[in-house]
Amino acid sequence: MWYVPRANLGDVVFVINLNRQEGFRMIRLRILLSIFVLGFLVGGTACGSSESDFQNYPADSTSNTDSTQSDATNQQGGALSFVEPVGDDDKPCTDTDTCTLYLSYNSTRKLEVLYVGTNGPIADATIRYELIQGQDTTVQLTAKTATSSNTGGAATQVKGFNTVGEVRIEVTVDGAPDVTPIYFDVAVTPKGTMPLSLLLVYQGSRNLEGTDVLLFRQTAEKPYKCDDMDVTNLPTADLGQYPIKPLPYSVNFPVFPNLENDSPQHYTMVAVGHEVDGPPLAWACEDGTENPSKTQVAYGASNQQTLVLRDIPPKLEGVYEFENYFDLITMMPEEAQGIINGVLELFENPSGGLLLLTCELGESALQDLCSQIFVDPANPCLEPAGTCLSAWAPMIMDIVDQIVFILIEETLAEDIFDVGQDVRNLLKELNFESTVEILAEPDATGLLTEDDTKEIWHTLNYRWTLGKDCPTPDDGTCGWESYSLYALPDLNPELLTGHFTATVNDFETIEIDPHSVNLKYGILLNFLLEKVVIPAVMSDENVDTWEDFLGTILGGQGCAVQGICCQNLGASVEPVWQSTAESLCTTITTLAGTAIRGQLMGLDIDSEDSFVIGTKEPCHLFDINQDQWIDQFGTEGTMCIWDASIDFNGDVVNMDADFLGKRAN
């Protein structure tokens, strides 16, 4: 027996028993075995799993490692992308996480991707493909992994079976959980067959950045008729595609649920065009009402349809505040012009106004005086002087002027009669506020019925600039005051509430038919002059009747409250004129006030059609903020126009009036 000395090879001790016949052969075996054990121990030391004497040898600093393997394991910020720029559905595959492919039965397609990092392509990475949605009886992957090349490219193949279906395949990078997955959507159909292809066409002018194409499967319980669809609140679709690109283009639907065993199927087809993240602007709908074959999808058959998108009209329903501008001077009937002109002359030519007003009333007690002033006392006028006034008129008017100005010099401002133009402007620039409610959308012909509308007139706005310190006379925003129409005599909310019919033309214009608004012209005119103008001119809110106004002009400030206006007038003139002055004063204060009020309020007739308005021409509608809701009727620069008419006891006067409507809600 031979004994082999103990070798210091870690904790391994070899003892070999030999007979003489095997000596040399076993010596050779011993040498080979020792070399093998030595190599094993050195390797274990390099991995850090041994405490052998070899573990302290330094590593080779010049050893080479594979550079591409370093890219795959160390490079950060890598991203997956598709090689194909556009999918079979004509949607872009670049800069997106999904790409769609179509497969015919028993055909194959490459699923090609790129793996690129911040420093360029990443090679030798393991790219994994996994079926995450759909059935494995629809497709088969030839390999579930692929290694990226020096260009970062990787690919596997997918094969379609003889089954209609759609699957989703997820692509990831092994060992790189921060890399966002991408997905292939693969649809399998019979060779050469596309069950449904829709060509989308739009010929309007709106900016359609994207189109939602939706399919709703029709059943007996849910027929999904287009007339019942609210494009702003559509139900959940059974199938849909949402491309973001300008029309026209085609959209293909290659897969329908269980079509092979459940055929044919019928779908209502809807296309909705819009800006990105914006409201619907145009749409098309086909429900097969006229031709059911248009909506049919059958196994092994193709259906190609064209959907023409039409502009969606903006919503009109809602509440609008209208501002309506009327000129009561222009609307004045001929029979009232004499009285009104006489009143207005009081603020521009006191003597002429008093005489004109007095003689307009036709009182017999003053006929002699009137015949000495006016060439035609029955139709008195002030201009032209040569044909209106007699030779005595200048002297008589001068006397009256002296009387009036003496009385007002101390008690009223000297410019009290410089406001005639303000009075005229007030009556020519009246603003009436009304609230218009559109309670329903127009029908298919654009018609709004009386049940669909409501109109309430409620506020009177007038402009009075005297004493307002307006920056300039032309400042149109200065001096406006408001008054409730309900505070006027014989006016109330019920009377001032009405309805109208109208026609909406392609939601671009509206034509409002003539309808009564029950505004009382005479009441309005008398109210403005008696309750607004007179107190403002006299700077005394207690002087708010025609009687007090005329008496104050003749008798001085404060005389109306004491009832001594005519006495003041008589005491202020020469005795020879005292009787005439008091007679003139009494006539004006006792008769003129009542006559003026009576003539003005007598202009109104007891008829619902005394004050009628309707649009003179189509009024333009505006969706100012493009949110598919009408915001305005007209604009500040181009207002809409009322064709207004007033019946003054058979004498119909027509005029134009501007208006502007703005949405309140």
Image (cartoon, rainbow, N blue to C red):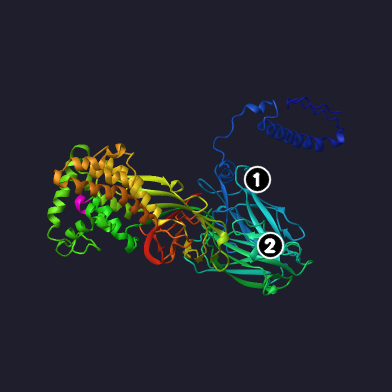
| Whole-percent x, y for residue 579 in the image | 20, 47
Q: Residue at x 73, y 26 (%)?
A: 10
Question: Magenta segment, which residues?
Answer: 348-352
Q: Residue at x 30, y 49 (%)?
A: 476
Nearest the viewer among 12 and 50 is: 50
| Tag 2 secondary structure | strand
549 left or right of 36?
Answer: left
| Whole-percent x, y for residue 525 in the image | 36, 53
Mark 2 highlights which residue? Answer: 216
Quarter holding residue 284: bottom right
Nearest the viewer among 216 and 564 is: 564
The quadrant in which the N terminus is found is: top right
Q: Main secondary structure of the magenta part?
A: helix
Q: Which mark is residue 143?
A: none
Mark 1 highlights which residue? Answer: 174
Can residue 351 be found in the magenta stretch? yes
483 left or right of 60?
Answer: left
Q: CA distance from mark 2 to mark 1?
A: 40 Å
Q: Residue at x 39, y 52 (%)?
A: 524
| Whole-percent x, y for residue 238 in the image | 69, 59
| Whole-percent x, y for residue 652 in the image | 39, 66
> Along the polypeptide, which appears first: circle 2 or circle 1?
1
Q: Please, what is the three-letter code of the amino acid marked with disc 2?
A: Phe
Residue 441 at least partly seen = no
Q: Residue at x 83, y 34 (%)?
A: 23
| Tag 1 secondary structure | loop
Q: Residues within 10 Å of mark 1 (few under 14, many from 20)?
A: some
